[in-house]
Image (cartoon, helix red, strand yellow):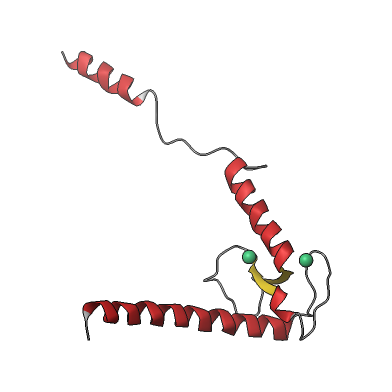
Amino acid sequence: MSTNSRLDKIVADARSSYEQREEGYRRKALGMYPWVCGRCMREFNNTNLKELTVHHRDHNHDNNPQDGSNWELLCVFCHDNEHQRFVEQVTYGDDKPGPVTTHNPFADLKSLMDKSGKD
Ligand SMILES: [Zn+2]
Ligand SMILES: [Zn+2]
């Protein structure tokens, strides 16, 4: 087996395990919640079920508690909106305080003063 095909296999394995995991929590969420979009209340059945997606409330796809508390069923449109809103919230902020600045403008001044004091 060449290095390339070995790499391909690793990538394929990773991808299929991701898909399996996604399939796993999707099936579980669909078994747990009514097939209704949590935003627009559109109802789903077996014919259009692929348009109903599982959203992670905290936007962390690795957070899949078995009680389903991090899942929400959203149609693809509302799911898109939800993520757009999240991006805007992160980018522009709303009620959150601004980014914490770790730079202290007086740090240099103090070291300068310390230096001059020693002379
Ligand atoms: Zn919807
Ligand atoms: Zn989502």
Picture quadrant of residue 107? top left
Q: Nearer the viewer, residue 114 or 67?
A: 67
Residue 20 x, y percent position in the rendering: 52, 84
Query: Relative to residue 72, is residue 100 depicted above or below?
Result: above
Q: Viewed as shown, does residue 57 lie left or right of 45?
A: left
Q: Viewed as shown, does residue 51 lie left or right of 117?
A: right
Picture quadrant of residue 57? bottom right
Query: Relative to residue 14, is residue 58 depicted above or below?
Result: above
Picture quadrant of residue 92? top right
Residue drawn at (68%, 73%), measured in percent from left and top? 53
Q: Viewed as shown, does residue 67 lie left or right of 105?
A: right
Quadrant of the picture in which ligand 1 is shown: bottom right
Residue 25 x, y percent position in the rendering: 60, 81
Residue drawn at (27%, 81%), measured in percent from left and top? 6
Residue 33 x, y percent position in the rendering: 75, 80
Residue 7 x, y percent position in the rendering: 29, 77
Q: Viewed as shown, does residue 93 lie left or right of 16?
A: right
Q: Nearer the viewer, residue 113 or 92?
A: 92
Residue drawn at (80%, 83%), measured in percent from left and top? 45
